[in-house]
Image (cartoon, grey):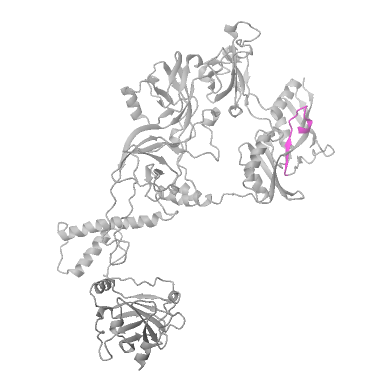
Amino acid sequence: MNLSTSIAAPAPVIPAAAAEIYFCASRNRRTRVLAAPPLNGIDYLEIASADDQTLLLLTFLRDPAPLALGPAHIAISGGESVTGIRVVAVTAARDRACTLALTVDRAGDFSPYTLNLFADGNTVEPPSGIDPALSQVVFSFKAGCPVSADCLPVGCCPLPVVERPDISYVAKDYPGFVQVMLDRMAVLVPSWTEHHSADLGVTLIEILAYVADHLSYRQDAVATEAYLGTARSRISLRRHAKLVDYQVDEGENAKVWLYLAAVGEGVILPSGTLVLPRVAGVTAQIDPASQTAQTLLAQAGTVFATLTSATLSQSLNQISFYTWGDTQCCLPAGATTATLSGHLDRLCAGAVLLFEEIKGPSTGAPEDANPRNRWVVRLTAVSCTDRFGHVLIDPTNSDPAANAITLIAWDAADALPFPLCLSSVSDAAHGARTLADVSVARGNMVPADHGLWHDFTPIGTVAPPPPTPIGGSSGDCCGASAPVAPPSYFFPSLPTSPLTFAREFDVVAPAAALTAAPAVDAPAPRPQLCVRDAGGGNWTQETDLLSLDSLQQGYVVETEWDGTSFLRFGDGAYGAAPDENMIFSARFRTGNGTAGNVGPETLGHVLAADHRITFVRNPLAASGGRDPDTLDTIRQRAPWSFRAQLRAVTEADYGEVAARDPAISAARGTLRWTGSWRTAFIAIDPIDAAATAPPALAASTQQRLDLMRMAGVDLAVESATIVGLRIGLAVCVAPRYRRTDIAQALGRLLISGQTCSGAPGLLAPGNFSFGETIYLSPIIAAAQAVEGVSSVRATAFQRVDDPARDAVAAGFITLQRLEIARVDNDPSRPDRGILDLDLEGGQ
């Protein structure tokens, strides 16, 4: 009665969204049953209701109606807290083909349950027409509850349980591995006692120990290179430093100015011409194709190459300064103009000249010339004719051939750093002779830098990818999925080191910029290298490969601690991966670091085919060569690189950031409330100690600080507050000394500076800075030390803007934090300081 009533009952409505599916375990069996009609079996089971969980949907592979299944044919077993669940009704599911709706008396717990189909209650065999393998299904009543794991079961072949051998895991080297394997063999094969090296078993053990030793080293190396403090590879340290935005310094090659002498006019010197260190007995000009050139190149430890092409002229080999008839003429320190003898129409703006002392000013002997009195300038203006096109001459003598002159000027960045003697009178011991051409100018100056180019050389062939490890795959533990090959990397090295790193040469920059220290924000030197593959494709240098896509051909240069440079190519994800068996070649340059900082007069041979070049030398020392960061340097600097101040917050921050400009000697920041908002006022003291900051300097400073100011803070750049001081000295002159001579000596000592030595005056503007306390005693001591001064007494020591207060008794004047003291002693600007000298005695 119950069975027929249940069958006749209307089919319940099934909420499709609440259904959860349970597949049978055997996918392959399902396919076989479908291929053998009329055999049937369970396909999957669903929990139709997520609320009471008492309605189950059992789906078959085929229509189950011919089976005439009822509650007596279905049994549910399992459960932890809820057991004995019975099927109370079996109906055909509405709108669901091949599906029966099973109503159970209660819902189960969270443990798994098993639904079985039986022919009747007296047997465990399935009903007729049901496949035995598909007569049951495991399910859970709580399938609709949220879970964090994937509910799809994954079949896995269980691995055999292997007893772990009793071995020593402290063995990490070859002898230890040999002993471990011999001990293990003694356990596995006690009868094997052969320990002779010629035995096959011993040979196999030693081979395995050799491989294990290498693997152990690799393990230790990986663990060592994983940390900044323990890494031994410079490449590893470079990659660690990259993570904290520290750019490892790869060094830089040295640069130098060369002077070349030529016979005739229009002698062409190509760019890249090699210049070698001087060797005794060898001519200055050497044919590049000669055996002598090859021998010197092979022996030379330092090779320079010209950075630009040049046209040499005999008329520029040596040029005399025009002294306007003065027998004791001197170019002062800071000079930016001069007059040359002759009509030098081959000189033009942009040309480079060398100023060089070639005679001793007191003796006239070449060996007494001071080698430090050499300076290179780049001309900004050249005039050898007047406004009418006439040759410039000395108007006191109208002979153009004898008195033609050329006016030259150069940039302030190339200002003469020392006084240069042009003409003099020798001392009495050398005849008191008039000496002309004590210093001369030389043209034919060519820039060069350290490094030797090597033509395209094979650096390696891309190896095929390594074989896929046995059992390696991307699927389950049975290895059913397709194997995945490990990535292939191409990491060749250059055959010669060290690789040259150089900056781009600016052909219009002042001459001093060639060997000067680069600015903080200057671009880093680039490796001198170009790489191409056998197909002619060019690969570009990159600082890293992270910004490249899978088609961009790039590489990164990485230098090891021994100077060997490696090239790291892309892997197909970050940068294009080189194709298998592709051959690469590189044209590169070697020569880097402080090895190129050779002294003056070191270079003496030029590899040029033109025999009209007769002489080459480097009058100044090469400079600018820097060695790469060492391992210790990287460890010390990298952790601090990300702590750089990138935002100005306090008053000190604004002053510190402003003073980073090389044109500013000091700066002070002050935060003030202007009535509407806070404003950071930055007072700057220019390096040239001008009374006020140039507008361009103030504008550039404000632009730099605008990127670092706090939000809501305005900026204003102003000049420092100049405070003029009045200093009065009563000087007693010793007998037999002239008061005028003593006054001039004191003026040079305190104000103008020493013309011959180039030493600035004691009260020069560059000697004062913000808020500096000015003391009187050093001024009196300096004046007292002048020859011919018997005594010095201070009569005035006060601020010009506060004459009522005199600090002679106190001995010092204290300034505010934004004030800078000045004693220019300029009659036109008494507000910038006054020096009063009252001289008594003497003559």
Residue 381 or 218: which is nearer the viewer?
381
Image spot of residue 724 (x, y percent): 76, 35
Quadrant position of residue 129:
bottom left
Residue 829 part of the magenta segment:
yes
- Left or right: 183 in relation to 65: left
In which quadrant will I find the N terminus?
A: bottom left
| Residue 364 seen in render | no
Picture coordinates of residue 543, whole percent (x, y): 45, 44
Quadrant position of the C terminus in the picture: top right
- The answer to which quarter of the image holds residue 775 is top right
Q: Up-down: is 421 above or below 507?
A: above
Magenta-span inclusion, residue 641: no
Q: Quadrant of residue 418?
A: top right
Residue 596 at least partly seen: yes
Magenta-tinted stretch: 817-832
566 or 838, nearer to the observer: 566
Tell me residue 396's x, y (percent): 66, 8
